[in-house]
């Protein structure tokens, strides 16, 4: 169990992810494992290496948050102060067959795609190092916020003779451009959160210790909860931004029109427009 974020986080089935929901509808998904990808024991913390078991817990947590009508925002973070996640457990990879590794990557791809396709805002709170598969998980989030001087990030899989195979090559290229992405991946070089900010890979870097960082994340995420923001509008903006860049521009415009048309028929759009005209704060209900 974890009591971070001012709420109780309960373990998922494999005890590799802790999950909880705040009173205002923020789902917290906390990665929690040792270097072998096994559950943490006692007071141990991180480095939150993942196995198929952890990815299954993440998958279940995503689905749980997706089907919870009270949840409007999801936060991904890591247990402890030093690591968001150090990526896949190397000892696990060393002990399984090539066939298992393929299906392990396939399932991870499906899980992270599910995260991207969930019509709820996903924030990765980088409380520490986000390396290898840890960065791959973070890149599937919509917004990435890092704690100042808490760690580094990168995709160093080249040093193992492999590539970042759970979305790393695809997402890093799309997020920072082909030339820099390729350079970082073929050199295996890690870079600072500040470098990530300059490349638009990181949205914000905040100062503070681990405890204040977690509280600040919750406070910041609260602006996207009901009744502050229209959750349907947030979801449709996410849909347009996720899908649109992958299709021709004219098709993107058509998608945008359809998403807007759906919103115009919503109760929240009527409330938002009425509130603007009446010069009052809108009270969105997610309908």
Image (cartoon, grey):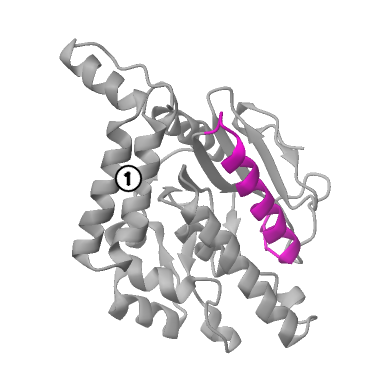
Is residue 158 positioned above or below 26 on the image? below
Q: Main secondary structure of the magenta part?
A: helix
**Percent x, y of residue 114:** 54, 56
Residue sitting at x 29%, y 27% = 269
Whole-percent x and y of residue 185?
43, 80
Q: Is residue 85 visible?
A: yes
**Nearer to the camera, 177 or 106:** 106
Q: Residue at point 55% right, 72% down?
A: 166
Residue 118 located left or right of residue 267: right
Classify residue 257 as left or right of residue 114: left
Residue at horizontal 37 percent and vertical 39 percent from the top: 234
The N terminus - image quarter: top right
Q: Is residue 87 visible?
A: no
Write the start and end of the magenta stretch as one range: 46-71
As displayed, is residue 172 above or below residue 231? Answer: below
Q: Is 98 above or below relative to 77?
A: below
Residue at 39% in and 78% down: 184
Q: Quadrant of residue 278?
A: top left
């Amino acid at each position: 169990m974890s009591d971070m974020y001012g709420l109780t986080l309960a373990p998922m089935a494999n005890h590799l992810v802790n999950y909880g929901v705040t009173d205002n509808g923020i789902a917290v998904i906390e990665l929690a494992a040792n270097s072998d990808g096994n559950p943490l024991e006692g007071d141990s913390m991180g480095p939150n290496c993942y196995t198929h078991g952890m990815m299954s817990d993440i998958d279940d947590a995503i689905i749980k948050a997706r089907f919870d009508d009270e949840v409007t925002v999801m936060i991904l973070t890591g247990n402890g102060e030093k690591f968001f996640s150090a990526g896949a457990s190397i000892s696990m990879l060393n002990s399984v067959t090539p066939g298992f590794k393929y299906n392990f990557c396939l399932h991870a791809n499906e899980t992270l795609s599910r995260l991207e396709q969930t019509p709820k805002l996903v924030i990765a709170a980088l409380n520490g190092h986000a390396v290898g598969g840890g960065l791959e998980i973070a890149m599937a989030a919509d917004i990435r916020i890092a704690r100042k001087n808490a760690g580094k990030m990168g995709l160093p899989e080249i040093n193992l003779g492999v590539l970042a195979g759970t979305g790393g090559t695809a997402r890093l290229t799309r997020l920072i451009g082909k030339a820099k992405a390729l350079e970082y991946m073929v050199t295996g070089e890690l870079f600072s959160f500040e470098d990530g900010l300059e490349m638009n890979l990181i949205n914000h870097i905040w100062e503070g210790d681990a405890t204040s960082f977690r509280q600040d994340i919750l406070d910041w995420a609260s602006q996207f909860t009901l009744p502050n923001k229209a959750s349907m509008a947030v979801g449709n903006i996410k849909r347009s931004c996720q899908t649109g860049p992958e299709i021709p521009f004219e098709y993107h415009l058509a998608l945008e029109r359809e998403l807007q048309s759906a919103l115009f028929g919503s109760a929240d759009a009527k409330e938002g427009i009425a509130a603007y005209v009446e010069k009052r704060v809108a009270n969105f209900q997610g309908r």
